[in-house]
Image: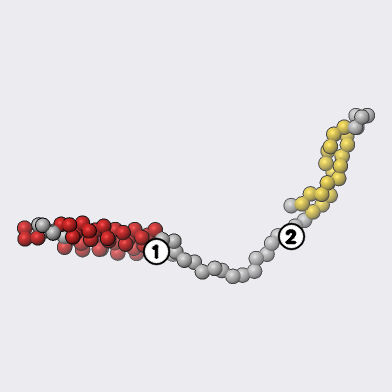
Amino acid sequence: MTMIRNSAIAFTAAIAMTAAASLGAANEAQAGNKGAYIAGGFIAGAIIGNALARPVYAAPAYGVVYAPVRQCWMQKEFVGYNHKGYKVYQNVQVCN
């Protein structure tokens, strides 16, 4: 959707710039009016830049969201060695 929108805006901007360039060719009688063309170019650039920079509004999607079921279990975990050199394990609860 965004690709189509950007392509349409770019195509419209290209047509507008071509039209402005063809109208902006000054002959000797209009040689002193270049400031209006420069101002028009800045205004057109601001409008096109603003259209491309704004985020597109997307309506919120309502629906059911299922959270994964949390599963927990008891697991033996190695703690260390006791005074006789035997391994010591402790039961801990592990959840995903």
Q: Give the total number of marks visible in the rendering.
A: 2
What residue sits right under mark 2 in the picture?
69
Circle nearer the N terminus (2, 1): 1
- Do the residues bearing badges 2 and 1 touch, measured as CB atoms within 8 Å? no
Residue placed under numbered mark 1 in the picture: 4
Mark 1 Cα shell of 10 Å, populated few (<14), some (14-19), many (≥20): few
Q: CA distance from mark 2 to mark 1?
A: 40 Å
Identified by mark 1, the residue type is Ile
Residue at horizontal 74 percent and vertical 52 percent from the top = 96
Q: Identify residue type, mark 2.
A: Val
Instruction: Give left or right: position of 2 versus 16.
Output: right
At 22% from the left and 58% from the top, the residue drawn is: 39
Q: Quadrant of residue 91?
A: top right
Q: Position of residue 8 (x, y in %)?
A: 34, 64
> Is 37 left or right of 68, judged from the image as shown?
left
Q: Say which residue appears at 86% left-offset and 42% top-offset.
A: 90
The answer to which of 63 and 44 lies nearer the viewer is 44
